[in-house]
Image (cartoon, rainbow, N blue to C red):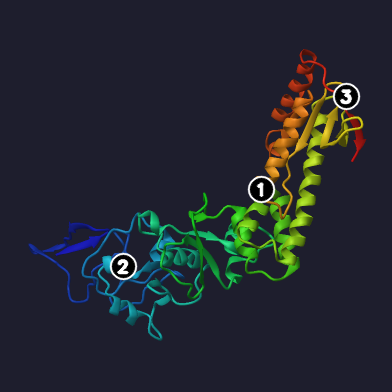
Amino acid sequence: MSRIVDGTVTAVRGPSRGGQVLGMNNNTHPETPFAHTTNAAPTSPTAPTATPEHTAPAIPSPTRAVPLGHLSSVQRRVLTTAQLREHGVSAAKAASQCRAGGPWQQLLPGVFVLHQGPPTSEERLHAALLYAGRVGRQDKESEAVVTGLAALALHRFSSAPPLLALEHIDVMVPRTRRLRSTGCVRIVRAHALPGTRTITGLPVAPVARAVADAVAHLTDADTVRRILAEAVRGGHCEPSALVRELGFARLLARPHVADAVEAVTAEGRAAGEERLYEMVRCFGLPDPVWNVDLRLPGGPHLGGVDAFWPDQSVAVELDTRAPRQDEDELWSQYARKREHLERLGITVVHLTPKKLREAMDQQAAVVRTALMASADRDPAAYVVVLPR
């Protein structure tokens, strides 16, 4: 006789009595693919065995066993029809285990949870990705990403509900996938999946995209405002990234979304200006004039800058994209203004709030270099400096 333990077949020998070897009797049950221990203490065939909560019960009468040592705990509790078939359990047998009073439950089409009782948040997320076809498949078209409020909860947003409180788990898949929303899974289609971040072993959408997918299903203005504010205040993403994703999703036309974006964009600009003040103060740069408009004497308006050193003809401009404007058009405006000022001999240093937050020392070095290099340049044109 033999015993199957994680797919390894070894001889089993009982104690010898008078030259005979005791084998397995009718009360001995072969181990299932979910048994992972060897040298276990013998138990009475009639005594019940204590089972930990949410531990996968033994698969009934498998015809063959596949090693499960590489699977995590949740992967052993949540399996698809195809995975069960690999362990010798037919679709009919799996369905019979999910009948009233049975040990299993079918959470989604083709996805089973091998215990009764409410599934954990980890099991729901894993089941959603199994249904979407990512787990266990290698082809690119099977990829899926957690997004929306579930992704924000994984990013630890305090403004997002707990995972167990979510009625739906949004899963993003390529537009070519033939899937429909069902049960707790809501399918979000995308022309191309964004770069993902792995959180607790799960593929999660970046914050800006997750916010857009969450806002698409939210009608409460206060909730939308809190989520957008946390995304910016918490340093998860820049206001420009939020505006871009919300614009792609065509959500900026909704009044409560547009109002929240305007408030968050203004707040993001104010935070960027505070970092700019901090950079000048902490790194000993000369004091500039702040938030001014530049104009040629008796001529056209040249545009506003966030900081200007008249003696060195150096200007700093913060790049904070405004809502409801096309990004390419806005960038063209930045570029035209910069080219015009530089033709007049004014050096323009272009900074972003993100650069100031992540590498303030490097940005200070760039500004200092521009100020020092002014002595080697030709004198700039005379411009009128007005408060903005």
- Residue furthest to the left in view is 19
Residue shown at the point (52%, 49%) measured from the top left: 195
Q: Three-letter amino acid code at disc 1?
A: Glu
Labelled pair 1, 3 in contact (Cβ < 8 Å): no
Q: Residue 288's image quarter? A: top right
Closer to the camera in the image, 150 or 304? 304
Which residue matches tag 2? 82
Q: How many angstroms separate mark 2 from mark 3 (CA)?
A: 76 Å
Residue 266: image location, x then y, percent: 80, 51
Residue 327 badge: 1
Does residue 110 lie above or below 126 as drawn? Answer: below
- Residue furthest to the top in view is 376
Q: Three-letter amino acid code at disc 3?
A: Tyr
Does residue 65 lie above or below 321 as drawn? Answer: below
Closer to the camera in the image, 40 or 186? 186
Residue shown at the point (48%, 72%) measured from the top left: 181
Residue shown at the point (39%, 54%) measured from the top left: 140
Q: Residues within 10 Å of mark 3 (few under 14, many from 20)?
A: some
Q: How many angstroms separate mark 1 from mark 3 (CA)?
A: 32 Å
Residue 310: image location, x then y, percent: 87, 25
Residue 207: image location, x then y, percent: 61, 53
Does residue 103 lie above or below 23 as drawn? Answer: below
Does residue 130 lie above or below 329 as drawn? Answer: below
Closer to the camera in the image, 115 or 175? 175
Q: Residue 41's image quarter? A: bottom left
Total number of numbered discs in the rendering: 3
Which residue matches tag 3? 382
The answer to whether residue 197 shows anywhere in this view is no
Question: In the visual, does 291 lie left or right of 203?
Answer: right
